[in-house]
Each structure stands twice: as structure tokens, then as C-alpha cells.
Amino acid sequence: MKTLKSITLLLAIAISFNLSAQNGGVYDDFIYNNTIPIERKVSSVVSHVTVFNSQAQVTRTAKINLEASGVFNIVFDKLSPYINMNSLVVKANEHLTILSVSNRNDLLNKNEKPADIILLEDSLENINAALADFKADKETIVYQKDLMLANKNVGSNQTGVKYDELEDLMNLYHKKLDDFKVNWFRLSKLETKYYGYKNAVELQLAAYNNGKLTLNNEVILTVKSDNKVQDAQIDLSYLVGNVSWQPFYDIRIKDNKSNVQFFLKANITQSTGEDWNNVNLKLTTANPAEGGIKPELQTNWLGFFIRRDYVQQVQISGSRDMLIDADEPTQKSIKSKWANSTVTQNMFNTEFETNIAYTIPSDNQNHQVDLTSFAQNAIYGYAVVPKLNKEVFVTAQVLANDLINQISGEANVYFDGTFTGKTIISPTANDTLLLTLGKDKRVQVERNKLKDFSSKSFFGSTKKEQTTYEIKVKNTQKDAIILTIEDQIPVSNNSEIEVKLLEYEGATSDVNTGKLTWKMELKADESKSVKFSFEVKHPKDKSLTGY
């Protein structure tokens, strides 16, 4: 045992010197003075996390007591293997001098498993043992049955067997076979049940272990202290991968007289191996991976394009010649060979800092965080497209200018406490954000083709068809509403087909799409109707599609 301890100590000293050599000879003075840094492992906690689109900056805080002056190796252990080591930043007590920062892997370290995982693993072991017993019992049944059937001959060729003895033997065989069958089905039923248990436990274990890693990574801070230090604080910050966040909204509307309430939230996913327990979060749209180097303009050389059969040569302002392949016959192709990569810098990043602490475990699952909320005025209305659906939908329009400073994301829409659907908030997409809040059956709509106003006629080789529709609407509720009705006429993309709008009773018409739109006010219990008609001319020997 003493020999093993000695070997371990020598190995630790060798590793320490090897690490110092790998990190630029920081320890030369220590070796020269026969001084080996004293190693201290510290217990650190994650105190703050800034989450970017695809990574996070984690800040860990540790407290340490140094009983005397000297040089110490302060070890932050059980860190994520996805740390960007170039991003390490250390802040220490003013009485401590940071001499170097390095890292290593402690392959002897084993993570302590949570009690839930230990319990599940024990349960899985017991289930597998029971399944093995069931399998062995079934194999025993098969063996006993085969043995009994292999020895079914009774008596001898000379004497035979008496009838009553044969009957007793047959009863015995029948009873034993029944026992085999009953026990076989009993064991099979238990097997099925236990396989169900096993599957459930394995799924739960997989869920618990999702994002869990063996944390062997360590960061070593070599510090120098001239005096005794009590409760010295050290902050270690680093960028780590396997992190993302996705913004989304909950849009809640109480009724069609209230403001629209926007609740901006985020789903954070991380599988760094480190759990963020009860930490303050900052979420930002910034991307630290983007370069911070200003692009530089290169000389824009002009030249003459000369085509040759075997090669093309470009004379570029002075003494520069460039040969290009003969299969690139345009100057546009030449420019692409000289193009520089473009670095885009976005100065308008949005940051959100949470007011409360959150726990985000390393489980590769979505964890919801509340970011901010705001209210906007809305214009409420009713809309119907009776050609496709005769039901009337309640809508709310929010001006896009009111959302210009908000980030894009999917939104869940709730009206009067009921989920009505999803939409996308994209401030630059349209002038207005139109929200569909659900159906209102108190507004009734009918759309009918009027036969008396529809006709077909022939003139030589031309067929002319006239069609008329009537849309009737009735507001049965006690309040007045503004109703938007949308319909359409067909549009021709063939010179042999002519479409003419004859009547549309106050609707606005889009000649490019054939869309007709009516906007009307309906008082309580009021009914109205609108008509539109159109004419189509086409060769009578050809059939129409889309009509």
C-alpha cells in the first residue's frame, strides 16, 4: 500500500511538471527554487450564464482559504468537455496574482450518480434477474415435457399393460401436460409484464442520462499569494458549446375590446454536462463566433476580356496577368475568383436578463424562461371566405411598426383563455400582424349561385358563360361588427380565354389575382347581401380547367 502511494505521488509530480512544460515554462522559477506548487481543489458553483444562439458563457465562482504565502495550483474540476479553452477568463482577489492557466483531464474521476439514477439502475438489475428466472423456468418445463414424452412406452412386448394401469398412466400424462401448459402461460404472461417494466425503466434512464457526461475536464490556475488569504473569491468564465435558445411568444387576448398582450419567452436547451442550478441568465441574439475584424477594401482591378480558343488572358492594370479556364467566358466568373469573404457585424443585438434565477439541467430538453411582456393596441374585426369556409373568424390587426423592436419567433395565440392556433411574429414581413382568434357562430353566412342570373350561349365557335353569386350575411349578436368578405373570379393566362367582371357591388377588385373584397358594418341583428357576376368566353370545342 505504501509503495502504491509513493508511485501515485511521483506520478502526480511528473504530471505537474509535464503540464508546466506544455504551458510555456511558467514553472521554471519554481523548479529552479525547488518549489512545487501546492494543489488545491475548490468547490465552485455556476453563478451566471449568458446564452448565445449556439453556445453560452458560463461564470463559476469559488472561495478559497490560503493559510500562508506561496504558489498554489487552484483546480476547478468536473467541467464540461465542450469548453473553448481559448475563452478562459479569470478574476481573482487582489491579494492573488495569476501566474498561468492550463487544463487537464482527470481520467480517474467518476461522477457521483444521482439517487434517482441509482434507484432506476437497481430496479433494472432486479427486472433482468427476474426475466432470467422466467427463462430458466420455461426451459425446465420444456426439458421435463420432452423427458416424459421420450419415456412414454410402458410394459414389455411379452406382458403388455393392464387396462386400469394404462388408465392411471394416461391420467398422469394428461395432468402433467396440463401443468406444463398452465405454468408456461403463467411465465409467459409474467415475462411480457416484466419486459414492459424494463422498457419503461430504460426509457426513464435514457431521459435522465440525456445530456449527462463524465466530467473529467479540469482547469488549473497557478496563483501566487504573498500573505495569508481568507475567503478569497475567484471567478472563472468560459465559452461552452452544446447550448441553444429559441424565442417564442404567447399572445393572449381577453376579448375584442382589450389590448393584445405579448409574452416573450424562450426555450433553452443544453447538454454541456454541467447543470446550471439556480442561476441568473442573460439571453442575447449576439453571436461571439462572428469575427470582430473590420473588412478591408481590396483594389478593384479593371482589365480587358480577351477570348482565345485554348486559354483566356486578362491584362490587369499594369504588369498583372491572370489566366483562367476557357470554360469561364464572362468577366463575372473572373470576379468570383478574386472575391473576398465578407464579415457581417450586427450592431443591433437584443439582450434579455432574467429577474429571477432558473435551473437548467444538462438533459438536452427544452426549459422555458420568461423574458418580457408588453401590450399593443389592436383593430378587431370579422372575416369570412365563403367560397372555402362559411364560418366567420374573429381577427385582430396589430401594426408592424409597434413590433419593429421585437425579435422574430413563433407565437401561440390564446383568445378568452382558449388556444386558437399559431402564428409567426416577423416584424419586417408585413405592414400589419394579422391574428386569427377563432370562430364566431353568431355571424351567419350563405353563398349561393343564382341560376336566374347565370347563362350559357354560343356564337359561332365561341362559348360564353355568365355566372352570378350572392352572399348573404346576418349578425345575430347584440353588438355591431365590421365584417370583411373575400371571394374571387377566375383569372385567364391564355389569350383564347377572356374573363370579364360584370358586377361586384362596391367590392374592391384585384385584376391580377381576381380577388374581391367587401368591408361592411353590420349592426345588431342586421342582415345584408352582396352579388357579383362575371363572364367567360372561350372556344366551344375546348374544356376549361379551374372553373
Image (cartoon, rainbow, N blue to C red):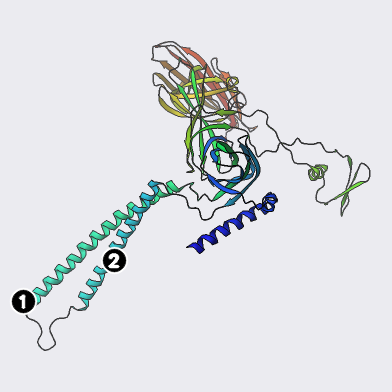
Residue 327 point in image, percent of width and height? 80, 51
Residue 416 point in image, percent of width and height? 41, 21
Q: Is 287 on the left-hand or right-hand side of 209?
A: right
Quarter of the figure with residue 398:
top right
Determine which of the numbered discs, if any, sits on residue 136 in the image. Answer: 2
Could one spot residue 454 in this view of the protein? Answer: no
* 116 versus 355 height, above or below: below
Q: Is 19 on the left-hand or right-hand side of 312?
A: left
Residue at x 43% of width, y 21% of height: 445
Q: Please identify, in this view, whether the residue under mark 1 or under mark 2 is nearer the observer.
A: 2
Look at label 1 and name its amino acid: Asp
Disc 1 + disc 2, Cβ < 8 Å: no
Residue 22 point in image, percent of width and height? 67, 53
Residue at x 70% of width, y 38% of height: 291
Could one spot residue 494 in this view of the protein? Answer: yes
Q: Nearer the viewer, residue 25 or 5?
A: 5
Query: Residue beneath label 1, please?
Result: 164
**Residue sitting farthest toward the left:** 164
Residue 7 point in image, percent of width and height? 54, 62
Label 1: state its secondary structure. Answer: helix
Q: Nearer the viewer, residue 1 or 430?
A: 1
Quarter of the figure with residue 448:
top left
Q: Nearer the viewer, residue 315 or 299?
A: 299
